Structure formats: structure tokens, C-alpha cells
Image: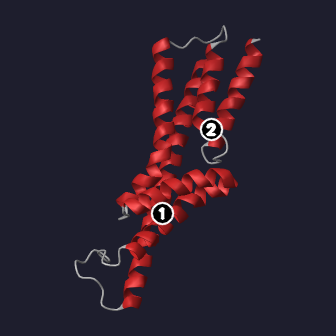
Amino acid sequence: MDIFLIILGAICLLLGLIGCVAPVIPGVPLSYVGLLLLHFTDRVQFSWQFLTIWAVIVIVIQVLDYFIPAWGTKKFGGSKWGVWGSTIGLLLGFFMGPWGIIVGPFVGAVVGELIYFNRHPQAIISGSEQPASNTQQAKNSNLTRALRAGFGSFVGLLTGTILKCICCGMMIVYFVQELL
């Protein structure tokens, strides 16, 4: 039974690592299940403190994974409309498969910013306090700003992915370390 649990735990850890970049698979929780499976063997016993701390880390990273793209949008100059667009794009992206989860926040942030600029033509353009006199110049500037907010959303998505990979990698290290 121990060998079965160890093999199943290793599979969970590897699938969890794949899940860090393939949005369909819940990578970090799956890796945690791999640690739990190893814990249930007679060969390795993690302390309850260790398992509790990792459970908290997994929950925090899962929650942050939903908020980091919106944070990236805001950090790159997006308005609340861009942040909301990024969040809605992420949620809608879930229904469109892996590419939807990757592209959804970017498109959502861009669309949210463009809606904002369409509804608020007096909005600050490119950081200046003066509205642009040329309508085409204003549209180009607004598009540039919207694309920057979308790029921020993408950077946030990459940041979340890197965090998940680090977390899963650390769990793999603990798993292998305890087995050896």
C-alpha cells in the first residue's frame, strides 16, 4: 500500500507542476495532495504543523492567483474599469479553456479601459492633465494606455504562474527529500 501511495503522490506532484502552467489543472492543491499521500504512508510522517503551514500557503496562493492579474492591471496604469475587465475576462476565460484563462484577463483589461475612455472622454490621457486636442491622437493614446493595462494583466498572470511553480517545486523537494 505504501508503494501505491508514494507513486500516486508522485503523480499528483508532477500533475500539480504541470497544472501551474496548464490552467485547467489545479496545480498547487494537487501537489499538496501528493504531500498528504506521502504522509499517509508508514515510511514518512510530516508534522501537523508542517501540513497546516503548507495548507495555508496553498490557500493563499490559490486566492492570490485570482487577484494578481487585476493587481498587474492596476500597477501598469489601468483604471478600476481595467481591473474589473481583467477580473471578468479571467472568469469568462474559464469557460473558454486554457487559452481563455491566459487571454481573458488581457482582453478584459483592454476592453474595460476602452469602455472607460469611451464613457469618460475627459479622462487624463497618457498621464498629462490636459486632454488631447486631436481626437485621433486621443484615441491612439487611449488605446496605448489600454494595451499597457492589458499587458499589466498578463504580467500579473505570469507572476501568479511563477509563484505556483515555486510552491509546487518546493513541495516536490520536500517529497523527494523525505523519500531519500
Residue 109, numbered label: 1
In the rendered image, which quarter is residue 172 located in?
top right
Type of the residue with mark 2? Pro
In this view, the residue in front, 132 or 43, is 132
Instruction: Label 2, secondary structure: give it.
Output: loop
Answer with left or right where residue 123 lies relative to residue 72. Answer: left
In this view, the residue in front, 17 or 147, is 147
Type of the residue with mark 1? Ala
- Callout 2 crowding tier (Cα within 10 Å): few <14, some 14–19, many ≥20: some
Answer with left or right where residue 143 lies relative to residue 96. Answer: left
Height in image: 148 above or below 65?
below
Count of numbered circles on the image: 2
In this view, the residue in front, 57 or 110, is 110
Write the residue at 44% across / 49% down. 68
Residue 88, percent from left and from top: 52, 55
Height in image: 179 above or below 130?
above
* Disc 2 to disc 1, C-alpha distance: 24 Å
Instruction: Label 1, secondary structure: give it.
Output: helix
Quadrant where the C terminus is found in the figure: top right
Write the residue at 28% across / 74% down. 127
Residue, far top: 42
In this view, the residue in front, 141 or 116, is 116
Residue 26, numbered label: 2
Residue 175, numbered label: none
- Which numbered disc flags the more N-terminal residue, 2 or 1? 2
Residue 138, percent from left and from top: 37, 84
Residue 168, percent from left and from top: 56, 35
Residue 180 visible in this rendered orientation of the protein:
no
Quadrant where the N terminus is found in the figure: top right
Residue, far front: 119
Height in image: 120 above or below 97?
below
